[in-house]
Image (cartoon, rainbow, N blue to C red):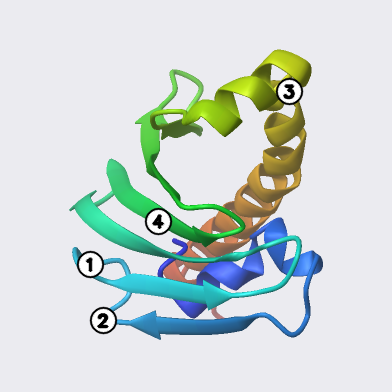
Amino acid sequence: MPTSDKGSRWSTWDKYEDDEQRIFTGPPATIGSTFLWNGGFWTGAGTVTIIDAQPNKSVKMRAKFKRPYRSSIDIEFKLQPSSDGTTELDWIVSGALNFRAKAFHLLVNADKMIGKAFEPSLAKIKAIAEGEEKKSAAAATPAAGP
């Protein structure tokens, strides 16, 4: 998840600024673990902290942005098994909009714009998860005898 260096494997935002400073604190994927970033124009600065974690079910985080403007949002990743044997991932973002954000939403379909930014990350998460699943399956398969 995003509060470990593995978050960099799938984050959409990493491609925008190579010199962004990143610090990960606490054991990965545990409550209280925090990811701090300090970037430039595209990524700004802030923190993401895990506030709840249910293994194989969900991770809830709070993101606090310091730049380009101060705000906070809650983020949740929910995993749900599907009837076809796959797993569905819901990426839920919620938070209050300040006056500036409300005005922006009047002019731009921010959900559509941000959704497009999330799509590459979701595709990377899927590829990583499917690759990890294949590695686990291969490790669990006994080697064929002579």
Identity, as a three-letter code, of the amino acid under mark 2: Gly
Residue at (22% x, 67% y) in the render: 30
Task: Specify the label residue 26 is tagged with.
Answer: 2
Q: Residues within 10 Å of mark 3 (few under 14, many from 20)?
A: few
Cα separation between marks 3 and 1: 31 Å
Cα separation between marks 3 and 2: 34 Å
The location of residue 98, given as percent across then percent down, is 47, 31
Sequence-first tag of 3 and 4: 4
Residue at (44% x, 23% y) in the render: 82
The location of residue 81, given as percent across then percent down, is 39, 29
Residue at (54% x, 79% y) in the render: 145
Q: Is residue 7 left or right of residue 11?
A: left
Vertical position of residue 32 compared to residue 21: above or below: above
Task: Specify the label residue 30 is tagged with.
Answer: 1
The residue singled out by tag 3 in the image is 112
Identify the element where label 4 is drawn.
strand
The location of residue 89, given as percent across then percent down, is 48, 35
Vertical position of residue 112 compared to residue 34: above or below: above
Identity, as a three-letter code, of the amino acid under mark 1: Thr
The residue singled out by tag 4 in the image is 64
Q: Nearer the viewer, mark 3 or mark 4?
A: 4
Cα separation between marks 3 and 4: 22 Å
Sequence-first tag of 3 and 2: 2
Asked if the residue at tag 4 contacts the one at tag 3, i.e. Cβ–Cβ closer than 8 Å, the answer is: no
Using the image as rendered, state which of residue 135 and residue 71 is in the foreground: 71
Identity, as a three-letter code, of the amino acid under mark 4: Lys
Using the image as rendered, state which of residue 19 and residue 41 is in the foreground: 41
Sequence-first tag of 3 and 1: 1
Asked if the residue at tag 2 contacts the one at tag 1, i.e. Cβ–Cβ closer than 8 Å, the answer is: yes
Q: Nearer the viewer, mark 3 or mark 2?
A: 3
